[in-house]
Amino acid sequence: MRIPARFLVHTVTVKPYTGRSSSGPRYGTPFTLVCMAQGARRWVRGTDGTQLLSTLSLYAAPGQASVVPAGSQVVWNGATTTVIASSDRDSGGLGAPDHTEVVCE
């Protein structure tokens, strides 16, 4: 079961991280992600295992973690934040909604 479309009430702009250059991080073409955004503070683990404070969590349709990699920039409500980690959540047929979770600084 996919996350119900009626829950996806927000849009954010994502600038996907594509790597580093000699002048700093590089980003791909910005795109709009339809999601449910929740501004809440919680501790999460980054891709390198460090513990970081997240202030924004996004829940989107499943299968989108690869297009919102760690290091990407997200603009929501006029503020820009950086993606700590993103992952696809699959319930394995247990009835919970499958979705992509993106946690941001």
Image (cartoon, grey):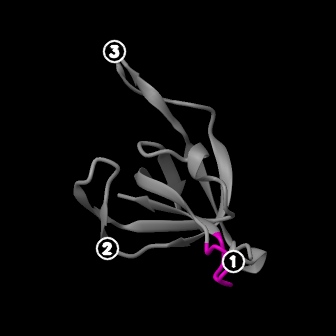
* Distance (Cα) linking label 2 and label 3: 33 Å
Q: Secondary structure at mark 3?
A: loop
Give the percent coordinates (x, y) of residue 63: 66, 55
Secondary structure of the residue carrying numbered label 2: strand
Q: Is residue 7 magenta?
A: no
Amino acid carrying mark 2 in the image: Arg
- Where does the N terminus fall, quadrant-wise? bottom right
Q: Quadrant of the C terminus?
A: bottom left
Percent position (x, y) of residue 52?
Answer: 25, 60
The residue depicted at 74 percent of the width and 78 percent of the height is 4
Q: Secondary structure at mark 1?
A: loop
- Which is nearer the eye, 89 or 79? 89
The numbered mark at residue 52 is none
Tell me if residue 95 is in the magenta stretch: yes
Q: Residue furthest top?
A: 22
Q: How far is disc 1 from disc 3 in space, using C-alphas?
A: 45 Å
Tell me what residue is drawn at x 50 percent, y 45 percent.
69
Describe residue 18's horizontal placement relative to residue 31 as left or right. Answer: left
- Specify the amino acid type for callout 1: Gly
Examine the rendered structure and indicate whether residue 69 appears above or below residue 36: above
Instruction: Give the mark, 2 or 1, whose residue is nearer the N terminus.
Output: 2
Q: Please provide percent x and percent y for residue 75.
A: 52, 53
Badge 3 local density, few (<14 within 10 Å), some, or many (20+)? few
Residue span colored magenta: 91-98
Q: Can residue 79 be seen from the camera position used here?
A: no
Q: Disc 1 or 3, which lies upstream in sequence? A: 3
Instruction: Name the residue that disc number 3 marks.
Output: 22
Q: Neighbour class for label 2 at 10 Å: few (<14), some, many (≥20)? A: few
Q: Position of residue 12 (x, y in %)?
A: 60, 57
Reading the image, the residue beneath label 2 is 42
